[in-house]
């Protein structure tokens, strides 16, 4: 099961909605290489990089070894990368590669995968895919296209899963209040206008909200604003110029839209049941903390995990009518409604170009990316969707197509974000969250809030870069 450990690793490696850009042909190209097939009784041993040993065998290892008993699998755990928050994740990742020399490499960050492909560290897979007649046509086209773009037009890896979000809505609440149902390819502005059409009167614990969120406070408001901005093609920082970039007309419009939505009281940001954190929680209690699952919000942005929450609530929650839910695509950029930032690839498996066990390593990647694995995992909650979407067409009678009907955005706003110091992001999110909340509360104008975020954010960025450079210099001196 994909859990918090994987999410932690992905965060440390700056893997949020990363997509590709066209490149030249990577160096060290292994084009045309085919692999000798393993004999029936031939034994092999491979090292596979994964988040931790337990989740590897639960998700992939046990099934693979049952299918291929002659291939021994050792796990190279990535747990050290996210257990020590003080280390540079890129350097730690490279150190682990150098020491362990895994046959199967795992990249949480597509940009790191891209660099490895350019440097000739990965085996080109097109030839062996053709050799084995392995079906990639039924993998989600956006996933394959993104991976291929990262390899300059060639495949240097595969991803058996992808992550996606959609806009969930409560059909009964819409019909009860006479509000038109959401549709695919709506913008954030359209979604927020729809949310405002629900009545805002009544006690907080009794009324219905147009849009629900699963957390509250400054951190939640910053995430909300940044999500809208990213959807509309805006980033809060220019990595190459090392500049914060929020004092613009685009950011002003997004913040004004957010302030208006919060002040209209159409967004639910509080725990609907207001549980006492000091008291033990039942499964039912936990489910009802989600305002959409509790029937208190008409819409909510959710993932495949939201599907699991809805199913658990249906089974365990008493005296609450199960949500009659459906879904449409997550909000899109008004300038390009056919692409989305809501789909991301973050589990990229590749064969080490220097591996002495390339065939066995490829057999592993081929199996976990194949039809048999997709069929076996179709009804298991992984926190992600199978790249073979033929096996995840519907859930509880509802179509899941909104999760994957749009194209993945190849113009990544988060490219090279890992080049900036990790502590900057924490400082910036706290600063921005506080200023956004001040604008919502009427303590500052939108212009004043953005001015503070721009100026104080730039100071934080410059300071973080200087501190990182000094740290790197000291470490280099110690290494001599």
Image (cartoon, grey):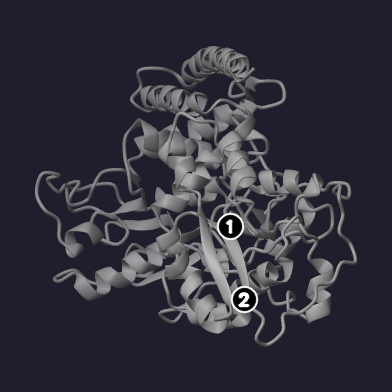
Name the mark nearer the viewer: 1 or 2: 2
Secondary-structure class at tag 1: loop
Q: Are marks 1 and 2 in contact (CB under 8 Å)?
A: no
Neighbourhood count class around disc 1 (C-alpha, 10 Å): few under 14, some 14–19, many 20 upward: many
What residue appears at the point 29 percent right and 47 percent down from the top-left corner? 200
Count of residue discs: 2
Residue at label 2?
367
Tell me the quadrant of the picture where the C terminus can be found.
top right
Q: Position of residue 51 (x, y in %)?
A: 48, 54
Query: Which badge, 1 or 2, is on the more N-terminal residue?
Result: 1
Q: Position of residue 357 (x, y in %)?
A: 70, 66
- Please state which of residues 259 and 386 is positioned toward the viewer in this rendering: 386
Question: As drawn, is 324 to the left or to the right of 386?
Answer: left
Question: As drawn, is 183 to the left or to the right of 173?
Answer: right
Neighbourhood count class around disc 2 (C-alpha, 10 Å): few under 14, some 14–19, many 20 upward: some
Q: Which mark is residue 73?
A: none
Residue sticking out furthest to the left: 279
- Please state which of residues 474 and 152 is positioned toward the viewer in this rendering: 474
Q: CA distance from mark 1 to mark 2?
A: 15 Å
Question: As drawn, is 200 to the left or to the right of 320?
Answer: right
Residue 189 in sight: yes
Q: Position of residue 74 (x, y in %)?
A: 53, 63
Q: Which corner quadrant of the image does residue 163 belong to?
A: bottom right
Q: Which corner quadrant of the image does residue 298 belong to?
A: bottom left
Residue sticking out furthest to the bottom: 40
- Please state which of residues 137 and 338 is positioned toward the viewer in this rendering: 137
């Amino acid at each position: 099961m994909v859990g918090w450990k994987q999410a932690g690793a992905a965060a440390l490696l700056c893997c949020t909605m990363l997509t590709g850009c066209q490149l030249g042909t990577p160096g060290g190209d292994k084009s045309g290489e085919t692999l000798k097939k393993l004999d029936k009784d031939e034994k092999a041993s491979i090292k596979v990089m994964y988040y931790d040993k337990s989740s590897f065998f639960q998700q992939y290892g046990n099934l693979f070894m049952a299918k291929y008993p002659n291939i021994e699998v050792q796990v190279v755990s990535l747990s050290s990368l996210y257990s020590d928050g003080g280390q540079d994740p890129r350097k730690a990742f490279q150190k682990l590669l150098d020491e362990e020399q895994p046959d199967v490499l795992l990249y949480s960050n597509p940009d790191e995968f891209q660099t490895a492909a350019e440097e000739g560290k990965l085996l080109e897979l097109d030839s062996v895919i053709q050799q084995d007649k392995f079906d990639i046509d039924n993998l989600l086209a956006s996933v394959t296209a993104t991976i291929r773009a990262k390899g300059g037009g060639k495949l240097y890896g595969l991803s058996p899963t992808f992550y996606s979000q959609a806009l969930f809505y409560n059909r009964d609440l819409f019909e009860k209040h006479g509000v038109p149902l959401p549709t695919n390819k709506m913008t954030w502005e359209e979604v927020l206008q729809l949310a405002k059409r629900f009545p805002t009167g009544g006690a907080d614990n009794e009324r219905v909200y147009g849009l629900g969120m699963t957390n509250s406070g400054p951190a939640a408001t910053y995430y909300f604003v940044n999500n809208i901005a990213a959807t509309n093609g805006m980033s809060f920082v220019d990595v190459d110029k090392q500049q914060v970039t929020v004092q613009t007309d685009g950011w002003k419009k997004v913040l004004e839209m957010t302030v208006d939505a919060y002040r209209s009281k159409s967004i639910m940001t509080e725990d609907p049941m207001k549980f006492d954190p000091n008291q033990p929680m039942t499964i039912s209690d936990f489910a009802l903390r989600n305002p959409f699952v509790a029937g208190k919000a008409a819409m909510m942005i959710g993932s495949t995990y939201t599907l699991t929450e809805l199913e658990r609530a249906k089974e365990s929650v008493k005296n609450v009518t199960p949500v009659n839910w459906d879904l449409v695509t997550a909000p899109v950029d008004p300038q390009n409604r056919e692409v989305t930032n809501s789909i991301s690839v973050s589990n990229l498996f590749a064969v080490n170009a220097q591996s002495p066990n390339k065939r066995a390593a490829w057999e592993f990647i081929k199996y976990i990316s194949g039809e048999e694995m997709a069929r076996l995992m179709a009804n298991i909650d992984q926190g992600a969707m199978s790249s073979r979407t033929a096996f995840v067409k519907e859930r509880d009678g509802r179509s899941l197509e909104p999760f994957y009907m749009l194209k993945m955005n190849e113009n990544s706003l988060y490219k090279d974000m890992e080049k900036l110091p990790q502590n900057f992001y924490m400082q910036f999110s706290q600063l921005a969250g506080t200023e956004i909340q001040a604008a919502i509360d009427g303590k500052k104008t939108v212009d004043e809030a953005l001015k503070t975020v721009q100026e104080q954010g730039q100071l934080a960025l410059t300071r973080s870069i200087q501190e990182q450079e000094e740290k790197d210099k000291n470490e280099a001196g110690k290494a001599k």
